[in-house]
Every structure is written in C-alpha cells, then in structure tokens.
C-alpha cells in the first residue's frame, strides 16, 4: 500500500494512503477519492479512516483546499450505511479531533434531470493552512450510525437537483437511519423553514427492520409575518453559517430579513443521544422601524404550508404541571382557540394522540411538542410573555391543526426596538414503548406509563431542567449544550437534571488536545475505536478551541463534572 498524489500546478503536496488524489486547478482543490475503503467495526459502530499527508515546500504560507469525495458506486460498496447521516472529522496523527471543520454536502436522489448531480454522492470540503516548510500527518474519519457507541449528530447541505428542485435544503440526522429534521432556509420548496421531521429508533416505514427511515411528522416555522391586508411578507436575504456539523453537537444559523424593518435569525442544533429527537432553536428578532401586521406567528408546530400529521389533543403547562388540555378542532384556516398566556418556568406545549397522513407507508408515527427554555421579548413597545393558540388548518384538501406562539392579544404593531429572544426545544416523542426499539431504558419506562399523553412533554420540561453550580470557569449557556468557559484550561461544575445524553461544551481552551473529563470522579471514556467520542471546534476570532461531550444523565441526582489538562507522563 502506498501514498498516492497528484500535485500538478499546486504549491501544496497532498498524498493519501492508498487513495487517488487529483488536483483541480479550476476549483483550486485536491480531490481525494474515498470509494471502497475497508471499514473498521461492524453495523452502527463501523467507521472509515483515511490517512493522508500535507506538505508545503515553499517559503510562504499556503492553504490546502481539500474535497473528500464518495461516488454512487462507493457509498454502499464497503461501509454498508447510507449517507443520510455522516460526519467527517479531521484528526491528528494520534487520533485527536483537530477542530478543523469539514463542511458536508451530499445527495441521494436519482431524478434524471439532475444530470451529473443525480445519483448518490458525498462531498466533504475543508481547508488547512500550512506555514512555510510545514509537513503534517492528518486522518479523516467518517462516522455514520454511531460516534463512540451513541447515535451521532450531523448537519449537511442536501442537494435537491436529483430530487427535482434547486434550492438550499438542509438536513440534520441522528445516526444513519434517515433524516431527523430538515430545513428550508429560503422557504422555496415548502414556504416554511422546518420541513421533514422523523422520530428516532421507532418502527420504520414499509415493514422494514429497525435502523431505517421512519414516518414523517414534519412541519414548523419561525417568524411568519402578515401585513395588514393579510399577505405574508417573505423571509429574504437569507444567509447560512455553519459553526458545528457534528458528531456530538450541531450548530447552524439561518439569518435574514422580513421586509425592510425586521431582522431575524434562527440557530438550530441537534445533539448526539440515544433516546429522542430534540431540535433546539435559538431565535432572535429585531425591529428597526414601526410596522403593522394582521398576524404574527413567532413559532409554530406544524406549519401553515406543511403539516404531516394531525393530533387529536393539545395541551399546555409548565414545570409544575398541566394548565389546560383540549380536543383539537381541525380545518378552516382560522384560530380555534383564544390566545392563552404561557406562564411559569419552562412552559411547554404538547400535540398528542397523532394520526398519520401516510397510512399506506406504515410504521410508527410520533407525537410532537416543545418547551420554551428561555424567553425575553418586547412587542408593541412593552415587555411581552409568549401566548399560544390552536389554528385549524386546511392544506391540500386535508384538515389538521397547528399550535402557534403569538404576541399578546391586542398587539398589532411592532415598534422600533421591539425584539424576541427565545430558546425553544422541538421534541419528537414516540407514541408507545412498543414503537421504540432504542437502548434508553428510562424513555421506554416512561412511554409504558405515560405514552401518547401530554405527560411525555412535561417529563422533558422537568427532567431536562438543567441546574448548574459553577466551581471553576464561567457558565455561558444551558441550552442546547451546557456551555462553560474554561479558566486556565480548567472547568468544574455540578449538574442536577438532564435526560438522554446531555451535551456539554468547554470553550476558551488553549489547545485541541491534552484534556481529561471526569464524571463523578471517574474519567469518561466512551470510545469504540479510540478517541472517537468527543468533538473539537476551533474559534478563529479568539483563536481558542472548544470540546463537546455528551453525558448519559437520567434526572438521577447531582453529578460532579470536571475538565482539566491530563497529567504529564
């Protein structure tokens, strides 16, 4: 086996172990083919590893632009996993994640009009800065179903050309068993941002065995704004920023305008876990000029223009319990309930007793809901709490309902300086213990007791209420990850509460390697193939690193968590 390269016309030399490398001068990148790699491990724990070398023989700093490619022939040739979930991690020669990002782009659609972009393919795009005279050894790892034995989180751009469209489409996934949450930032295909949503590790569609695609329970949106005449003002000027693409935590921001007066953004995240899909949305809206409206939806599940299921019941409450439950009234494109103020700590909403829209596809569906973890707002020139209302929906000749977070009654005008700042968890809950085949025993027990009721959403509101006591370092945020700024490469805190695998991120680290995480005094080691259970990210503004871990916590008391540099041998 030998390293292969083609450095023609490039000042940078890229060689890969037993992999063809071609330099594309038109695009300025080295294309590294990943077809036919023998995986390590089996089933969901299988991953691919590719070693390569980078050299800059010049006396000036250079940038190596890399494009890692799998073709249709190579995607199932060895690994045996689909590309619905895949994360590419660059590691150093010792196997430590470097924090150098690899942006993910892929396609699995086969519409002939897609031409050369149809069929299945995967691209991982990265660039590495090389000082003059630099030579380094690097390893690319492709994780599919699992990272460190737990469903990996990923976020990628999904090409629609082979499907029959041509717009930005984003797809996040837990594991490699189908989509978890899809996003349409430009709202070009479905006229809403949250599109396909699928539950995790429940009975798949079409009578297939486990580890396959599940039913779609999608639809949702942020900041739907209608002028006084009832016409919707579209989201425009959208820009996407990828900060984290997995495999422990994703973080992607969609930002743009609503008309000339309103700026808005949504930062979406998904964390590695073994129980349910929790999409966390950090929302921000700012108003520069006064603007009137006939309807304003801050957040909704499903969406006016996309709703894949219908729920027979809805309920709202908070940390202390149920406020109200009611039978839904589908159809009509009108509000079916008067706005109800959401009060109390960690207000939540449940859409349960769902029925499917695609009965012929079979498989389990899921219930939906959300928890408002953080909320600050000024609407109509006054401090404002969230309010909620059911809206009956008639869409494509089918009736259902959405659940909308709306401004306080009587507010029909946004004033300069108005804003919304909120963190909302979007929850996708299996309906029964029989549907769920995953490994999380606490979830299965809860479903056996309270499945298909509002109590499953309240369980999330209470059980995932993270209470943190800092000893060393600074608490930055509690959701989507417990984010702690380290002090001199050290952080220590206590945690009470949490469900599934709770993401914990340590920032302000001076190195991408050389740390030990302890949980209740014991070193954390979830590795399957060695150093394959944490995520490292680099912050170019501060020139520091962060590390993200996912800790299994089941609301089982108080835990001590500590990150410190490892003792020198």
Image: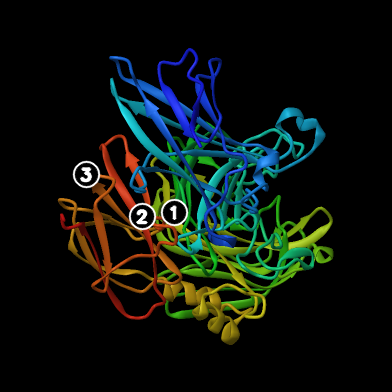
For label 3, the SS is loop
Q: Is residue 415 visible?
A: no
For label 1, the SS is loop
User: What residue occupies the far front of the structure in this picture?
Assistant: 1
Image height check: is 120 above or below 58?
A: below
| Residue 380 horizontal/vertical position (percent) | 45, 49
| Residue 84 horizontal/vertical position (percent) | 63, 50
| Residue 304 horizontal/vertical position (percent) | 68, 52
Structural crowding at the residue carrying mark 3, measured as other residues with C-alpha within 10 Å and reported as few (<14), some (14–19) or many (≥20)? some
Mark 3 / mark 2, whichever is N-terminal: 3
Q: Quadrant of residue 228?
A: top right
Image height check: is 249 above or below 254?
A: below
Q: Which residue is depicted at the point 77% across and 59% down?
A: 332
Mark 2 / mark 1, whichever is N-terminal: 1
The residue that mark 1 highlights is: 249
Left or right: residue 21 compared with residue 464 = right
Q: Which residue is depicted at the point 41% across and 55% down?
A: 532
Mark 3 / mark 1, whichever is N-terminal: 1
Q: Are marks 2 and 1 in contact (CB under 8 Å)?
A: yes
Report the front residue among 73 and 19.
19
Numbered label attached to residue 510: 3
Q: Is residue 81 visible?
A: yes
The residue that mark 2 highlights is: 548
Numbered label attached to residue 379: none
Q: Which residue is depicted at the point 52% across and 52% down?
A: 47
Q: Quadrant of residue 357?
A: bottom right
Marks 2/1: CA–CA distance? 7 Å
Report the front residue among 291 and 148.
148
């Amino acid at each position: 086996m030998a390293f292969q390269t083609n450095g023609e016309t490039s000042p940078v030399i890229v060689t890969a172990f037993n992999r063809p490398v071609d330099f594309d001068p038109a695009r300025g990148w080295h294309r590294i083919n990943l077809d036919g790699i023998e995986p390590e491990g089996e089933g969901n724990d299988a991953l691919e590893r590719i070693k390569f070398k980078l050299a800059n023989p010049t006396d000036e700093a250079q940038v190596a632009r890399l494009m890692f490619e799998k073709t249709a022939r190579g995607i199932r040739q060895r690994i045996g996993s689909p590309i619905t979930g895949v994360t590419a991690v660059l590691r150093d020669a010792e196997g430590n994640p470097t924090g150098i990002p690899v942006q993910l782009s892929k396609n699995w659609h086969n519409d002939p009009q897609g031409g050369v972009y149809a069929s299945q393919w995967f691209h991982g795009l990265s660039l590495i800065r090389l000082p003059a005279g630099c030579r380094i050894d690097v390893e690319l790892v492709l994780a599919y179903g699992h990272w460190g034995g737990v469903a990996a989180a990923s976020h990628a751009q999904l090409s629609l050309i082979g499907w029959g469209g041509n717009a930005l489409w984003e797809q996040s996934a837990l594991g490699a068993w189908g989509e978890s949450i899809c996003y349409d930032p430009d709202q070009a295909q479905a006229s809403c941002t949250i599109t396909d949503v699928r539950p995790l590790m429940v009975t798949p569609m079409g009578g297939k065995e486990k580890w396959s695609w599940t039913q779609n329970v999608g639809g949702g949106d942020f900041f739907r704004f209608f002028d006084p005449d009832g016409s919707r003002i579209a989201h425009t000027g959208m820009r996407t920023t990828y900060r984290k693409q997995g495999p422990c935590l994703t973080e992607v921001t969609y930002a743009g305008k609503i008309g000339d007066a309103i700026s808005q953004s949504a930062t979406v995240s998904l964390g590695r876990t073994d129980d349910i899909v929790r999409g966390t949305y950090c929302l921000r809206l700012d108003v520069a000029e006064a603007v009137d409206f006939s309807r304003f939806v801050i957040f909704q599940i499903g969406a006016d223009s996309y709703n894949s299921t219908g729920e027979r019941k809805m309920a709202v409450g908070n940390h202390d319990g149920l406020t109200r439950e009611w039978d839904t009234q589908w159809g009509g494109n009108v509000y079916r309930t008067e706005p109800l103020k959401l009060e109390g700590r960690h207000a939540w909403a449940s859409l349960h007793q769902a029925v499917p829209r695609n009965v012929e596809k079979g498989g389990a569906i899921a219930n939906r809901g959300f928890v408002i973890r953080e909320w600050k707002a000024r609407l109509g020139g006054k401090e404002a709490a969230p309010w909620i209302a059911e809206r009956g929906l008639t869409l494509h000749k089918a009736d259902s309902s959405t659940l909308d977070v709306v401004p306080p009654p009587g507010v029909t005008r946004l004033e300069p300086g108005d804003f919304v700042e909120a963190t909302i968890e979007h929850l996708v809950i299996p309906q029964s213990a029989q549907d769920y085949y995953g490994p999380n025993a606490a979830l299965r027990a809860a479903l056996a007791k309270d499945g298909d009721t509002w109590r499953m959403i309240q369980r999330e509101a209470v059980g995932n209420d993270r209470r943190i006591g800092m000893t060393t370092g600074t608490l930055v945020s509690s959701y989507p990850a417990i984010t702690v700024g380290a002090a001199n490469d050290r952080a220590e805190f206590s945690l009470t509460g949490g469900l599934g695998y709770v993401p914990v991120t340590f920032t302000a680290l001076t190195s991408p390697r050389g740390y030990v995480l302890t949980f209740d005094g014991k070193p954390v080691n979830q590795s399957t193939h060695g150093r394959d259970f944490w995520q490292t990210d680099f912050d170019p503004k501060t020139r520091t690193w962060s590390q993200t871990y996912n800790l299994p916590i089941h609301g089982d008391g108080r835990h001590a968590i500590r990150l410190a540099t490892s003792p020198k041998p």
